[in-house]
Image (spheres, rainbow, N blue to C red):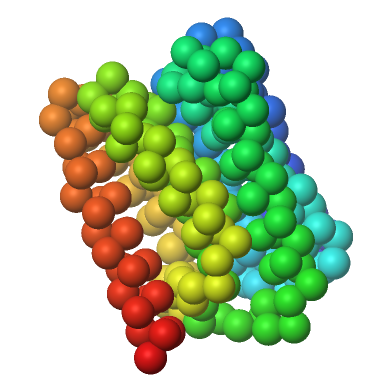
């Protein structure tokens, strides 16, 4: 029983380790591996909370570990990746710009941790750092196909959207079957296989996904202003 309750924290630590490995791979010019590790971290991050609720293993320790893992895997690791794939041409200035992302992300996490309504299952306040870091990982994964100006705009927008007060829907309300985690892993493996066979075409989906996400965020902004 104690082992079962430790599983969510083990996944969280696995998420943190993915972030560390991603930084190492990025520093050694293995950018695709670095990006994929961030995406794997996203999968682990999506599972630890659900398993904690399934096993009735919610704890203060787990929540603190989750925030620490998030700032590394979805804050620091993506910023390193962006520097090595995009901002390196600006040298020290590029490093300073890339370093802004984890600052905004850390502020967003800290605000979430002290928020009185953080227990809401329906929405997040501001874009979650997990989503923002994942988007940067995708951008770096397909950096040779995406113009630098588009990347710069998305990078800047994500920084401010993380600390915004927009209500972003939470996926916690989405019902999953009992073995939903296994299904998630299976679908992830299937997508990876498809990705390997259609690498030349898949990157163009970013031109559909990114505008759709931005349009939705703008819709939320206009809706909240009314």
Q: Nearer the viewer, residue 155 or 24?
A: 155
- Viewed as shown, does residue 148 lie left or right of 203? right
**In the rendered image, the vertical position of residue 49 relative to residue 170, given as above or below:** above
**Residue 33 visible here:** no
Asked if residue 200 shows in the view, the reply is yes
Q: Is residue 31 above or below residue 35?
A: above
Q: Residue 178 in the image: state x and y as whole percent.
A: 47, 70
Q: Residue furthest toward the top?
A: 28
Most foreground residue, 117 or 194: 117
Q: Which picture quadrant has residue 205?
A: top left
Asked if residue 211 is positioned above or below residue 98 in the image, the reply reads below
Question: What residue lies at 65% left-to-right and 72% top-to-bottom?
Answer: 53
Q: Position of residue 87 (x, y in %)?
A: 49, 22
- Which quarter of the image is occupied by the N terminus? bottom right
Residue drawn at point x = 57 percent, y = 13 percent: 91
User: Image check: 18 left or right of 159?
Assistant: right
Q: Position of residue 39 (x, y in %)?
A: 47, 39
Q: Residue furthest bottom?
A: 226
- Residue at left 37%, top 67%? 217
In this picture, residue 64 sits left or right of residue 121: right
Return the residue nearer the eye: 195 or 110: 110
Q: Quadrant of residue 5?
A: bottom right
Question: Is 98 located above or below residue 135 in the figure?
Answer: above
Quarter the C terminus occupies: bottom left
């Amino acid at each position: 029983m104690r082992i079962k309750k430790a599983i969510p924290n083990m996944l969280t630590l696995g998420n943190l380790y993915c972030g560390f490995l991603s930084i190492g791979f990025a520093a050694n010019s293995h950018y695709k591996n670095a990006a994929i590790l961030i995406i794997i971290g996203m999968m682990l991050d999506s599972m630890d909370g659900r398993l904690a609720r399934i096993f009735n293993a919610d704890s203060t320790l787990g929540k603190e570990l989750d925030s620490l893992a998030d700032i590394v895997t979805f804050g620091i690791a993506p910023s390193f990746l962006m520097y090595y794939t995009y901002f390196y041409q600006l040298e020290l200035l590029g490093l300073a710009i890339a370093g802004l992302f984890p600052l905004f992300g850390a502020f967003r996490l800290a605000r979430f941790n002290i928020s009185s309504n953080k227990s809401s299952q329906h929405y997040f306040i501001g874009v979650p750092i997990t989503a923002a870091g994942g988007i940067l990982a995708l951008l770096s994964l397909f950096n040779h196909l995406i113009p630098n100006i588009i990347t710069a705009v998305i990078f800047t927008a994500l920084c401010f959207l993380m600390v915004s007060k927009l209500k972003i829907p939470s996926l916690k309300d989405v019902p999953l079957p009992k073995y939903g985690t296994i299904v998630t892993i299976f679908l992830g493996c299937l997508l990876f296989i498809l990705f390997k066979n259609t690498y030349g075409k898949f990157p163009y989906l970013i031109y559909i996904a990114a505008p759709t996400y931005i349009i939705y965020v703008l819709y939320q902004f206009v809706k909240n202003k009314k």
